[in-house]
Amino acid sequence: MTLEKIIEEIEGYYVDSDTEDAEIISFFEAIGDKIYKIRNINNLDKSRLITSFFNYLKNQTPELEENWTFIHLLEDIDKPKYSIYNDILIETNKTRPTYTSVLLLNRHINSIESGNSENYIDLLREISENKGIHEDIREIAAEFYQYQLTKK
């Protein structure tokens, strides 16, 4: 399967309130198998693939809860440097944060040295205070923001 087809599958996958967690897990496990069969994904293709995962999130209801199969697969694409992933993660949280993207932002903050985390922590605060963002997303951002302040 080509990368183009995988991206189409990811961006075309929609869940609703009736979608079982097991179905979502199964879908992303299958996507992971397809991705791992492609050898030597270059940075441009990594960027396109990571963007497709975030587009999937943008196409869902913002308060769609986390799916750890999705999260671990997404985080694995740009290992070990995460430079492509981090840029897209930050942009997503600046433009249209979701429950999962805020969780991923918090995980990112946890992975970096505290002296380098102020801008990311500020982004959590901005999300938590933005009345244009769904209340559930603001609440989880506020919880993570308070958590990060206690770590300083």
Image (cartoon, helix red, strand yellow):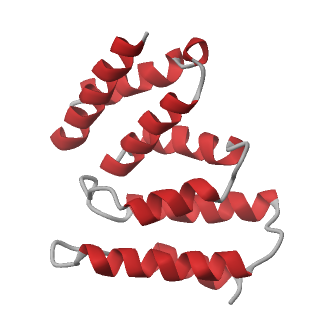
Near-viewer residue (40 or 63)? 40
The answer to whether residue 58 is above or below residue 8 is above
- Residue at image position (25%, 41%) is 137
Q: Is 6 on the left or on the right of 100, as rendered?
A: right
Q: Which residue is farthest bottom?
A: 1
Percent x, y for residue 86? 61, 41
Near-viewer residue (95 or 41)? 41
Percent x, y for residue 39? 81, 75
- Residue at image position (78%, 60%) is 44
Q: Is 94 on the left or on the right of 150, as rendered?
A: right
Residue 94 appears in view: no
- Residue at image position (60%, 20%) is 113
Q: Is 99 on the left or on the right of 2, as rendered?
A: left
Percent x, y for residue 74? 55, 59
- Residue at image position (16%, 78%) is 18
Residue 126 appears in view: yes
Near-viewer residue (60 or 139)? 139
User: Dividing the image into 4 quarters, which one contains the C terminus?
Assistant: top left
Toward which corner of the image does residue 144 lie, by quadrant?
Answer: top left
- Number of numbered discs: 0
The answer to whether residue 112 is above or below residue 118 is below
User: Dividing the image into 4 quarters, which one contains the N terminus?
Assistant: bottom right
The answer to whether residue 19 is above or below residue 86 is below
Percent x, y for residue 50? 60, 59
